[in-house]
Amino acid sequence: MERILMLIPADCYADAAPALASAKDNAFSPQRISYGIVLQEEPQEEDLAAMRALGSVLFLAPADDPWSSFPALWQGEGYVLLSHPAMRFTRHWDMQLLNALRACHSDSDWQCVLTGFPPTPDDPVDAVSPVAAESFDTAGCLCFHKGTPLRYAKAPETSAFLNPAFCFGPAAFFTAMAEETPPRFLAAFRGKWALFTLHKPLIQMAWNTLIAPCPIPVEEGRVSGLARFQLKFPMKLEERKLSGMARTGIFSPDLSFPTHVPLAVRLQESWHTAAERKSRLSPLFVTAYVSLPEPGERLPEEDFCRFGRLSQMRNLALLCFADSAMSRRLMPMLPNVLEYKPRYGLPLPIENQQEEAGKLFALSKMFLLAQGREKFLSHSHYGWINFGYLGYPVYERASLSWESLCTDQIVLATVNGKADLSMIIVPEERLHDLCTEILYRCREAYQSLHTLPEEGQLWQDMLHDLPDWFEPVELPRRNGLLELAMLNRSEEFHTQ
């Protein structure tokens, strides 16, 4: 039997106990699991009794680093799971983790290790996310975040980075890493260990965990392996330049991965789609891609990949405005692509258009809806949706239910009381009045201040001044309004 050491750090045993119990109760073979606990506080007598009831347990206290503590806690197990007190395990996780590790495909002389961000209850979908590079802090350290969730992924996906709160692999990997110093993703690369993101949500996290920013080594060549690492995983860390691959954690040219939607999910979605055919609600969503002087919050290739997911949704009526170069690129993906013209935007003469380009485009969104209405008159509602809105894969035939979002008021999300303008749904009969109100407020601000208002502040003022017009929906995160029209995590048939 292939034995697994569950290596877990915690402040005290009580913090680790729920994760330990979940691992034991849900294992296919509980006898294969042994436990190595790294505690900052000495366990009490009742803690020692609980450890004895758990099974094969060793602990170190006081200690706080599971990597350096591993040799003292290892009892010859073939595999090690570096875990976290927030972990909760699904049924038969041990057998499925071993199967997932075998499913990794690396170069012949590289051994494989699984990592990633297991999902939390707050995540939009039940999927593991790769560890991805987000940005650099003021000290030049690399900051990490959750990349594109591996929803419906067929197999584990190559990863550049390591999550110290979740790592599963052969014991030899942990033996090698015990003597290494951070960043351990570089140490793994030097040692010819291939990192992969787990493709199945076999583990859940009760709360979010963060990865501390990582200093970039100044050494080059054989000392750190940084130069070779950057050739394999496109990025330039010394120059503080990240690629779309590094920022999404998906190392393929189009930032996508092979997927397979389970039959149970496809059947469920078809039933819901059939039920929605009787609805009289027919929203048309409008988006746009316009080159602006200021960079956006994501790289262009990230937004293009995200738009690809939107364009594939067959039950979402979508119209895209784009400048001439981008429109030619988008037309093979979406039939409804129109060339963006400045006259489609905010109808207000601006002297310094280059300086105000970002504000001008942001304030033009509702006027683009009006253009969409002129070209497609048969829709009950017109909605704005950001070009890079959809941050995870969806089933192309996913059903959409509009009853809660297409009302007689303007619907948008708020996050901590602030308007989330990534998606706004406007009833057809209110669109003209809304455009008139925005134009009036922009003209007043420009005449008095000689600058356009900020988009966010303008909408906050309208929410305050015209409460009867709006139906705000408070959500925990941005880009979440469309999820209210789709099956949520608890409703979707189990995907594994």
Image: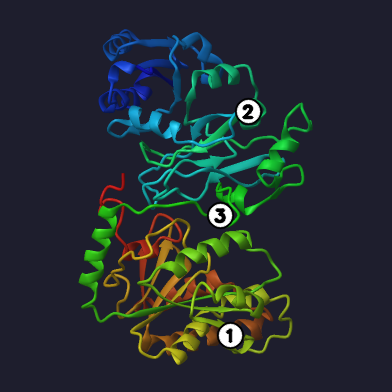
- Badge nearest the viewer, 2 or 1: 2
Counting residues from the N terminus, which is met first, the one under dot 3 or under dot 2? 2
Dot 3 amino acid type: Leu
| Callout 2 crowding tier (Cα within 10 Å): few <14, some 14–19, many ≥20 | some
Q: Residue at x 60, y 39 (%)?
A: 160
The reply to whether the C-beta atoms of the residues labelled 2 and 1 are less than 8 Å apart is no
Q: Secondary structure at mark 3?
A: loop
Q: Is residue 238 left or right of residue 169?
A: right
Q: Position of residue 12 (x, y in %)?
A: 40, 19
Residue position marked by numbered label 2 in the rendering: 192
| Residue in view at x 25 percent, y 25 percent | 25
Distance from the alpha carbon under mark 1 to that under mark 3: 34 Å
- Is there a contact, CB below 8 Å, between mark 3 and mark 2? no
Q: Nearer the viewer, residue 88 or 433?
A: 88
Q: Quick one: which residue is furthest to the front in this view?
A: 108
Question: Which is more N-terminal, label 3 or label 1?
Answer: 3
Residue visible at 32% across and 71% down in the picture = 405
Q: Residue 335: image x %, image y %?
A: 48, 79
491 relative to 93 in the view: left or right: left
Looking at the picture, which amino acid does disc 1 mark? Leu
Q: In the rendered image of this protein, does residue 338 appear above or below residue 271?
A: below
Figure colour scheme: rainbow
x, y percentage for residue 148?
50, 51
Question: What residue is disc 1 on?
Answer: 346
Query: How many angstroms separate mark 2 from mark 1 (CA)?
Result: 55 Å
Label 1 SS = loop
Q: Which residue lies under the disc numbered 3?
A: 255
The amino acid type, in three-letter code, at marker 2 is Lys
Q: Is residue 390 above or below residue 103?
A: below
Q: Could you give the CA–CA distance between mark 3 and mark 2, rounded to whole angstroms?
A: 24 Å
